Image (tube, rainbow, N blue to C red):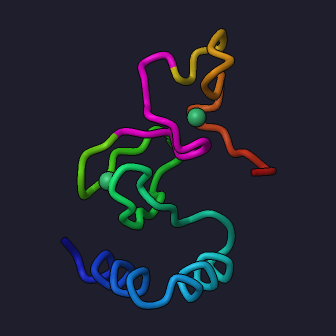
Amino acid sequence: MNIIFKFFIYIYKYDRNLLFEINRKIGGNKFKQCPNCYVIIEKNEGCNHMTCINCQHEFCWLCLKKYSEDHYALYNLMGCPGMEFGIKINN
Ligand SMILES: [Zn+2]
Ligand SMILES: [Zn+2]
């Protein structure tokens, strides 16, 4: 567990609004919470398939649903078709 990660857990515990403020200043959705354990996760690469550093839960960065093998398949209208490396403009 690195220092930045601890820092964000600290902020999250004590001042949730500050976290959202930082997130906005950094520019966009660089940080989100794991939908399983609620730890703050930083998006590092272009891929939207995320694995939580805390609980190893796999989820989709865009919709925060549990990741499945066909989540980004073009026919999967319940997932995020074609968006594995995409960026959603509107949330
Ligand atoms: Zn987690
Ligand atoms: Zn998704």
Q: Residue 48: percent from the left, percent from the top?
A: 52, 41
- Give the x, y percent position of residue 65: 51, 37
Asked if residue 71 is among those painted magenta in the image, a careful observer would answer no
- Counting the numbered discs, the total is 0
Residue, far top: 75
Above or below: residue 10 compared with residue 60 = below
Is 90 located above or below residue 70 in the figure?
A: below
Q: State the residue lying farthest toward the left.
A: 1
Q: As drawn, which residue projects farthest toward the right?
A: 90
Residue found 62% across the figure and 63% down from its top: 29
* Residue 72 percent location from the top left of the image: 57, 23
4, above or below 32, in the image: below
**What segment carries the magenta color?**
58-70
Seen at 80% across and 50% down, the residue is 90
Q: What residue do we see at 63% from left, 21% from top?
A: 78
Residue that appears at 48% across and 58% down: 43
Q: Is residue 28 above or below residue 66?
A: below
Q: Please state which of residues 29 and 37 is positioned toward the viewer in this rendering.
A: 37
Which quarter shows the N terminus? bottom left
17 to the left or right of 28: left
Q: Position of residue 88 (x, y in %)?
A: 73, 45
Considering the whole magenta stretch, tell me its main secondary structure.
Answer: loop
Tell me the quadrant of ligand 2.
top right
Q: Nearer the viewer, residue 66 or 25?
A: 66
